[in-house]
Image (cartoon, helix red, strand yellow):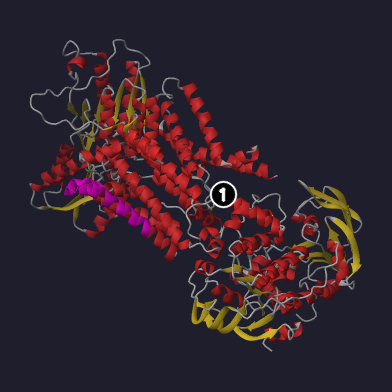
Amino acid sequence: MGSVSVCPHRPIAYIVKLELKNISKSFPGVKALQQVSITFTPGEIHALCGENGAGKSTLMNIISGNLRPDAGDILLDGRKTEIENVLQAEALGIAIVYQERSLTDSLSVAENIYPVHQPRNRYGYIDHKVLHKNASEWLQQFRLTMHAATPVGKLSPSQKTLVEIIKALAKKPRILILDEPTASLTHEEADILFNMIRRLRADHVTVIYISHRMAEIRELADVVTVLKDGIFQGTVPSSTPDREIIRMMVGRELAADTFVSDVTKEVLLEVKELSGNGFEDISFNIYAGEILGFAGLTGCGRTALARTIFGDSRYNAGSISIKQRPYSPRHPANAINAHIAYLPEDRKTEGLFLERSIADNIASVSLSVPCAAYNAGKERETADSYVKELDIRTPSATTPVRKLSGGNQQKVVLAKWLATQPDLMIVNEPTHGVDVGAKTEIYNIMKKLTAAGKGIMMISSELPELLQLADRIAVMWQGKLITILSRKEATEEKLTMLASGL
Amino acid sequence: MNIKNSLTDRVFTLGSSIVVLCVVMTIAFPSKFATVDNFSQLLLNLSIDTIVAVGMMILMIAGMFDLSVGSIVAFAGGMAGYLMYYHGIPVALAISAGMLGAVGIGFINGWLIARVGINPMIQTLAMMGIVRGFALMLSGAGIQNFPYDFIVIGQSRLLGLQMPVWYMIAIVLLFAFLVKNTSFFRRYYFIGGNERAARLSGINVEKMKVWAFVISATLAGVAGILLSSRLGAALSTSGRGLELRVITAVILGGASLSGGYGKIWGAFLGALFMALINNLLILSRVSGYWQEIILGVILIVAVGVDQLILKKIEK
Amino acid sequence: MRSLIYILLLFACACELPPRPRSEKGGVIKSAKKFITADEISADEEYIMVTTAINLPLYVNHDQKAFLDWGKKTGVRTSILGPSEWDVPTQIATIEQVIAGKPAGLLINGTDPGIAQAIKKAVDAGIPTVVYDSDIPNSDRHCFIGSDWYEMGRLQGERMAAITGGKGKVACMGILGMENMEAGFRGFQDAIKKFPGIEFLGKYDDKANVETAAKIAADLLAANPDLAGIAGFDSNSGPGIALSVKESGRVGKVKITTVDAEPEHLALVKEGVIDYLVGQKRALFTWLGAQFLFDMRHKTLPLSADDAEAGVIPVPQTVITGSIEIDRENVDQFIQ
């Protein structure tokens, strides 16, 4: 689109300054926000950090019109404004991209980008040509190659995230709120997004960017506001050292971690020339006590590989063996019997039973073991002990899982698998959508597993995470295993280059 | 058990409504409602529907349903009747043949739905027609004059109640126990809650689904044999409209169309509630025109009130 | 565990088996069950009609109207119960549920042999019970009143032969599997057997549904360009057949005979589309039926000192009400 501003078909630009004064909000039993005052300067990329439960989501919901504050004022250009609902917020120029998807799988990309106010032709019906054309312009900007008429259900998670972002951008917002947008994106896609955001900034749009990724914040943001337990901790320039910011968030210094390797000589998993749907000729070993990381771009075949090892997908060539015994799974039940666990990429649709209680979820794998009696008491006990051990924040183990935050939900999935005493655990994006505090806890759990002689296959798009935890890192590209780097050799640059096929 | 839990427990709210309804009916029809005769008749007419409802509840917990149960009821009775009447086959064998037929139909349903992937509504709808056709062929205008040993099953009395009532009680107790206490049946809650996550938790979803249809069809077969034994006739119109009645009863009893919810006692209470309303309509000599309207309204009111209570509690 | 088994065994012993069917022992008088009588006529005594397809216009306009009129004239309560669909099991359930209330009499539409058990229960409970329209064997009912379907079929067959000139292809339709209709089909076929020029195509099931009847007729018309006539046996056959014959433009070439004389049938006869109707005297079923119930209860005409004690049923066992023949000549008498 050349030098056209980031929002094509744009009318007059105007600037909106957002200020929050003493905003408070409580829910039963929880003070989500306490007298939070923040000033957002237009033309500034303003990052927002905080642990889960710090109040970021609540604050964003209030700004975007989903919730009403109990006390305090929202000022737009110095005028007190009541934001009654989402539509009004949008009319005021506020758009938000949530962590959870708001797309409709059965509709096309174009229809999702423009759910209302579609272009009409002279008879009053929707002009699909114009609709698609507008949508295509956006897709081009983000270097997305799919057709605007593609049903969203066929897109990959990262493509869906980009469509969500475009949907918000298409509303021509003056205040754009992004909640962990790069969680499903690759580096390339994140870069495109960042450029988009910078152009918005040049247009004097206020961008509020919620993230846990320090590197991103340093690269992108101008200032960072930190919330802790619903209380405003301060707004600092983004050049502030990570340690400082994290200290403001969690109130303690995160100790520089010293890495201890638990690798042994015993081969736990051996994969030989495995080929299946989405990958070809993969061979590698995982040793007991080892964390083998898997890096690569979205769609390179890591998830397909993981699902195949777990028995969810068929393979058509090659072999697998667990603990030197041949292993040919045809169903996840076989994998579970072989003491393999799998933490899926999308916990909401693949890992959890949202309406059921924490206790039910933790016990859900043991159900597949053919044993006749079901003991509710024992289930509760197991659940309670895991809640304690993993520090899952919840009033009780009978709470339905959908009420938990992302990090706590992930811990429930972990607990469910830990309860099966696995030998090999495959984790796919283990800290996706998880706050800093919980992240560290999850890393500790993983290390505890390896210390006990278990092996972990760790798929992640967060290179710092891989570099921090893995003993070796495998890189995949377009379905092939390019190489496996040792801990010493691996750097972010090298990994990124290999993952891009260079 | 606090108030909130009680109000969201359908078994509790439905049970209380039933008690209230019984009290009201006793006051309104002093000599007609609260009699042993009336109750035993009520339970007898309830028994067939309830037995089928137990199977339907299991299916609905898993997020599916079976529209062919009414036809299976007619088929099982028709098959047994046909063999006994036209070919003089001994009672036990004829009954086994009818039951085997029912089990077979359930297996076909389950297999086509779970392994081949046909939509349950379409599959069972089609099966409903197919099986009804076979039932019509077998029972023709209606078969009567069954051997004494056959009608003993449905017409003996135990403590004044006819046998189908006891079968109903036994089946409800058995399945209520199994669903609550065995991991086999608990899996259905998870399949209904999130099929994908269930598979990734190691549950063989396809196998479990086939079983669910087999169980449902088997119970329908039992109901069919009991019905024809009790009537002393295998009617070609047996079970027409049964599937919708049973689904209504099961939904009243706490099942959700999307799956993951429901208890066996709920199925029994749902069917009981509908039978009481029916009884009420007959006792008050309300004409048949109104019956369907009233039952439909009750379903909406019951589920609607439930939703409202749920919303209030969530606040 | 063991105690559970003992309890179950104890239970099983309490099991009461149903009565064995009475064996034909010589010399034992088959006595009728005792039925309930009353000396006074009370305005509260209730006579209940239990039918199925309660909204069927044929039933509403004739059976039910006559019944209600009778109730008003006699000064007693009448009630009409039953499902709105053709749902025999529900009809059975309804019969069983009203037995407990011991009504003065039960007037039951003989829809299906399967209701025999329920009728037996009513009779065993001492309730005067009359079956109308179609008889139910093995039910111990006190009286049956209805048409003679074989006769109805025969009349149609003879008229069809007459108006087609004894030549051509004919078919008939109705509800397959119903006793009375099958008797009607037999009567029809026996009548046309005498005419070798007539070819019988077969009997078809229209499920008492107008659209189905129309569709079957349309198929017959399409498959047989030389079709001479169609005979109908349930009240929806006529209108359905007439519709298809009209649509195919073969009015007059294809003869139609059918049963029942509802306004739509009569209109079609006047129009000349239907050639012959065999009507039933349905009002008599329920009026006379109810009257028999009343007479049983109130010992109107005693045949012995105490009929109930003596095992005598003081009303006819079977009453055939006969048929009404309607064609263009007398149709005006019936159109209101």
C274 relative position to B106: left or right: left
Q: Position of residue A320 (x, y in %)?
A: 52, 79
C212 relative position to C317: left or right: right
Farthest residue, direction bottom:
A502
Q: Main secondary structure of the magenta part?
A: helix
Would you place residue B36 above or below residue C4 in this image? above
Highlighted magenta segment, given as a residue range: B80-107
Q: Is mark 1 on a helix, strand or loop?
A: helix
Q: Position of residue B39 (x, y in %)?
A: 40, 29
- From the image, tell me which residue sits under label 1: A376
The magenta stretch spans residue A6? no
Total labels: the figure holds 1
Quadrant of the snapshot with the N terminus of chain A: bottom right
Image quadrant where residue C92 sits: top left
Q: Where is residue A354 in the image (x, y as percent from the top left)?
A: 62, 56
The magenta stretch spans residue B84? yes
Q: Position of residue C18 (x, y in %)?
A: 25, 32
Residue drawn 52% across the image and 71% down it = A311
Q: Which of A407 and C219 is in front in this view?
A: A407
Q: Nearer the viewer, residue A416 or A76?
A: A416
Q: Nearer the viewer, residue C332 or A469?
A: A469
Quadrant of the snapshot with the C terminus of chain A: bottom right
Residue drawn 36% across the image and 29% down it = C97
Specify whether residue B19 is in view.
yes
Specify whether residue C172 is in view.
no
A175 relative position to B290: left or right: right
- For label 1, the crowd category at 10 Å Cα-Cα, with few meaning under 14, some 14 to 19 and many 20 or more, is few
Residue drawn 51% across the image and 40% down it = B299
Image quadrant where residue C60 sits: top left
Under mark 1, the amino acid is Ala
Image quadrant where residue A58 sits: bottom right
